């Protein structure tokens, strides 16, 4: 695969990891939040927690994509083994399924 793609994924990984670090840092401040139930700060903390989970999943997804690149499996549909449309990959670099599989699995 092209090194440009690898570069693109690495930039995304760096951004995702920075985001994760930022969220982790925010979660360290839990002690500052009041213990009162219904405290907006608690909601914010829980929201940050959920965001951290999303960020972690994103980091993992990007890592997988980089791994697929290295193994030459990038751009291959994990469901049917067909090549994923380059235009689709351009729009969704982390796509692991071709458009027809993605459509058929979407409920
Ligand atoms: Zn497919």
Image (spheres, rainbow, N blue to C red):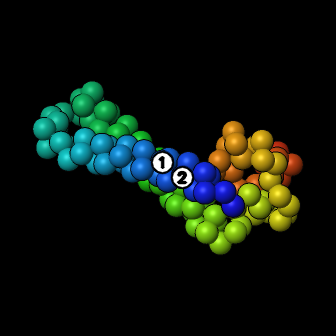
Q: Calculate the distance from the C-alpha at mark 2 to the C-alpha at mark 1.
A: 6 Å
Residue at 29 percent across and 38 percent down: it is 45
Q: Residues within 10 Å of mark 2 (few under 14, many from 20)?
A: few
Q: Is residue 2 left or right of residue 78?
A: left
* Residue bearing mark 2: 7
Residue at 83 percent across and 65 percent down: it is 81
Mark 2 CB near ligand 1 (8 Å cut) = no
Which residue is situated farthest in the front direction here?
A: 3
Residue 45 seen in the current view: yes
Please identify the quarter of the rendering in which residue 50 is found.
top left
Q: Position of residue 30 (x, y in %)?
A: 19, 43
Q: Position of residue 19 (x, y in %)?
A: 37, 43
* Foreground of the two, 45 or 54: 54
Q: Please say if the residues under marks 2 and 1 sit with CB atoms less than 8 Å apart.
A: yes
Q: Position of residue 91 (x, y in %)?
A: 69, 39
Which residue is situated farthest in the bottom direction here?
A: 71
Q: Is residue 65 left or right of residue 97?
A: left
Disc number for residue 70: none
Residue at 50 percent across and 47 percent down: it is 12
Q: Position of residue 94 (x, y in %)?
A: 63, 50
Residue at 69 percent across and 61 percent down: it is 1
Q: Quadrant of the C terminus?
A: top right
Q: Residues within 10 Å of mark 1 (few under 14, many from 20)?
A: few
* Foreground of the two, 49 or 77: 77
Q: Name above or below for residue 83 compared with residue 103.
A: below
* Residue bearing mark 1: 11
Q: Secondary structure under badge 2?
A: helix
Q: Secondary structure under badge 1?
A: helix
């Amino acid at each position: 695969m092209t090194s440009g793609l690898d570069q693109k994924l690495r930039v995304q990984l760096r951004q995702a990891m920075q985001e994760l670090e930022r969220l982790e840092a925010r979660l360290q401040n839990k002690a500052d939040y009041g213990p009162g139930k219904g405290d907006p700060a608690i909601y914010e903390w829980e929201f940050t927690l959920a965001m951290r989970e999303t960020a972690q999943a994103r980091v993992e997804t990007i890592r997988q994509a980089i791994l697929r690149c290295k193994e030459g499996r990038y751009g291959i549909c994990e469901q049917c083994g067909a090549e994923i449309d380059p235009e689709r990959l351009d729009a969704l670099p982390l796509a692991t399924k071709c458009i027809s599989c993605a459509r058929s699995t979407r409920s």
